[in-house]
Amino acid sequence: MKNWSYISVFIVLFFATSCREASTLFGYDTVAKVGHSVLTGTEISAAVPKGLSGSDSVSYVESYVDKWIIRQLKLQEAELIFSSSEADIDRMVEEYRQSLLIRKIEQYYLDKDSNFQITDKEIEEYYNAHKSDFRLSSPVVKGYAVAVPEKYRRREWLLKMLRSPKAGNFEEAEQDCLKSNFRLVKYDDWVDYAEFLANLPLLRSANHEKLLSERGVQQIHYQSTYYYFRVIDMLKAGEPMPLFMAKDKIVRILTNRRQGEVIRQNEQRIRQNADNNGLVKIYVDSLNIN
């Protein structure tokens, strides 16, 4: 309680004055101490978010001090328990430091090069060479679906136009749907079959792949509405996916490949420079190679 009373007084002064002024009132900058570790008012000043005031500020500082104390106690206990493993810990810390530095220098190489623009030609070439790597996990289709009220007087005519193989008849039916404000959804590009089925009154939990076998106009009557739909084309699960679906993955692959090339080129550069300047020496005899 005595320690927290001291800290509470500091907090009040801390927010009433500057950190340095509050420290001066105490005669020193120490707020808390655990063993040889010291928490100063200057550190707290740097840690407190701007804009805090009143009880929020006091709560924040109290929490900060508490966490700092627990952290120091845990560190001291760890040093006591794992003192025999100090060499291993130092080794791990050094390995981590080296890994950080290597990641930073590699990122420096990449930022300096920054020529990672992947062209459509490169994407297409990679796709054609690795088509078997890009397989569909579910069917995709092209087609359309339209919802027509059963009382619509031209419904039979509309269905006839949709079924007609004559050029221009579908466009005429489409214009009629637009004028009548019917919900018509067209998929001229490949779309996941589940997304296509979302336009129809079907249970999502059921298997509707049998509908894929019919290439003509199909219909479903549900709650005073006729749903006309047609699967114009389809690709089954397991078949190569269309290029546009594989594009993002290919871009990532080609970008990673190009980044790897940049890093390898810089590795070769620094190795060549080091060899030329005599910075690298390999003592084969010391390796005990037979």
Image (spheres, rainbow, N blue to C red):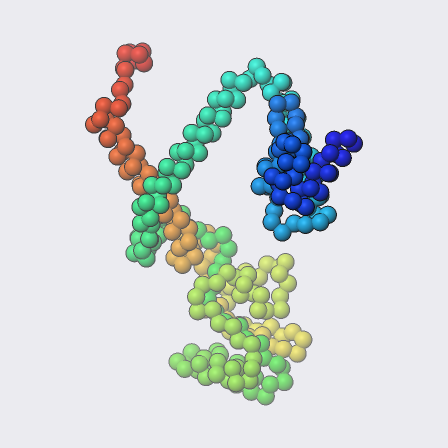
**Residue 63 showing in the rendered view:** no
**Residue 122 showing in the rendered view:** yes
Nearest the viewer among 263 and 19 is 19
Residue at the far bottom: name it. 153
Say whether residue 232 is left or right of residue 263. Answer: right
Say whether residue 29 is left or right of residue 235. Answer: right
Residue 34 is situated, as x and y percent measured from the top left of the image, at: 66, 26
123 vs 150: above or below: above
Q: From the image, which quarter does the C terminus lie in?
A: top left
**Residue plotted at (36% across, 47% down):** 255
Residue 146 is situated, as x and y percent measured from the top left of the image, at: 54, 75
Q: From the image, which quarter does the N terminus lie in?
A: top right
**Residue plotted at (52% across, 82% down):** 177
Nearest the viewer among 243 and 115 is 115
Say whether residue 41 is left or right of residue 161. Answer: right
117 vs 150: above or below: above
Residue at the far right: name it. 1
Nearest the viewer among 42 and 156 is 42
Residue 246 is situated, as x and y percent measured from the top left of the image, at: 41, 54
Q: Quadrant of residue 75?
A: top right
Residue 176 is situated, as x and y percent measured from the top left of the image, at: 51, 84
Question: How many numbered marks have been drawn onto this rendered protein structure?
Answer: 0
**Residue plotted at (40% across, 55% down):** 247
**Residue plotted at (31% across, 41% down):** 262
169 vs 230: above or below: below
